[in-house]
Amino acid sequence: MRKIYGIGETVLDIIFKNNQPQAAKAGGSVLNSVVSMGRMNLPVSFISEYGQDDVGTLIDDFLKSNGVDSSCVHRFSDGSTALALAFLNEKNDANYSFYKNFPAKRLDITFPVINKDDIVQCGSFYAIWPEIRKKFKTFISSAKENGALILYDPNFRPTHLSDLDTLRPLIIENMKMTSLLRGSDEDFKNIFGANTPDEAWNVVKQYCKCLVYTANVEGVYVRTTSFSGKFPVHKITPVSTIGAGDNFNAGMITAIYKNNYGREQLEKLGEKEWSKIITSGVDFATHVCLSYENYISEEFAKELKASKK
């Protein structure tokens, strides 16, 4: 059976608004995605690392209760689970402060064997983190060689701009292993100085064959070797945008899985097929923006599953 894997960082998100804590949620960009997919009853596994402390146990129990296989998580005792303090501004976008205490030995696990057309999601700083880069690259390279569909979201934060000259080659290296590249307008502006979807595509098409470029209220642009299109988004007043991009990714993967699109098909898809993928991504992201949750609600997942029957 086709499987889905997410590899990424785990944190406990503590969300502040007007200097007051509003919520504490299991977080991390890929974790947010896999929880939403788990709630959709997809066969999803998480590859990550967190402590054997109370916070780590809370997160591990949460993942399992939401249908996410955590057997590939490194539960370390020498250190503590990472914390992320998210401070929402007047637009309800977040600025972060991170608190991390990792052991010397990172990602000390046996990686799963990935099969043809399995789906692997990766991204954010975790995909270019120097301490785990060798293990990450070996895993993603193997997944590509075995025929997996790999979705990469660079999710590049401005706080890393001072290290861009060092990090950009690693981002490009990831793009070369990618089946589907999904990034925001800010990502491509920060990484490559590209200000439009076509400018971004002109840069990244030498590395990968499928680009999904999200431009907030302006819409979603798709560029592949055989298709160019734009899709609308919903106009809303967000409560929090913390999990928006993560759940856009989850929605896309859900549609790709449900419609049984394989890696080789992606660059050949037309407007009808891309509409299914992008609409699913937009619906997931919109729902998450209307609460302090990092993932789609169980009620929303139930509605989506009922509508597909």
Image (cartoon, rainbow, N blue to C red):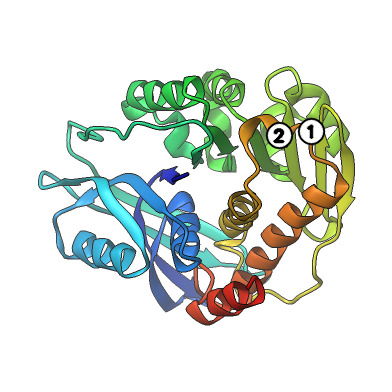
Q: Residue furthest left?
A: 77
- Whether residue 83 is visible here, answered yes or no, is no
Label 2: element kind: helix
Residue 204 shown left or right of residue 129 in the figure: right
Residue 118 shown left or right of residue 277 in the figure: left
Which residue was labeled with disc 2?
A: 265
Q: Which mark is residue 114?
A: none
Residue 187 shown left or right of residue 222 in the figure: left
Circle 2: is it few (<14), some (14-19), or many (20+) Cα within 10 Å?
few
Which residue was labeled with disc 1?
A: 268
Q: Position of residue 96 (x, y in %)?
A: 48, 56
Label 1: element kind: loop
State the image quarter where residue 111 is shown: top left
Answer yes or no: do the residues labelled 2 and 1 have beta carbons within 8 Å? yes
Q: Quadrant of the C terminus?
A: bottom right
Q: Position of residue 270 (x, y in %)?
A: 85, 42
Report the front residue among 63 and 302.
302
Above or below residue 179? Residue 137 is above
Three-letter residue code for mark 1: Lys
Q: Position of residue 70 (x, y in %)?
A: 28, 53
Above or below residue 146? Residue 42 is below
- Whether residue 73 is visible here, answered yes or no, is yes
Three-letter residue code for mark 2: Gln
Q: Residue at x 35, y 20 (%)?
A: 134
Q: Quadrant of the N terminus?
A: top left
Q: Residue at x 82, y 36 (%)?
A: 223
State the image quarter where residue 59 is shown: bottom left
Q: Position of residue 282 (x, y in %)?
A: 72, 62
Q: Residue at x 71, y 34 (%)?
A: 265
Whole-Å distance between the Cαs marked 2 and 1? 5 Å
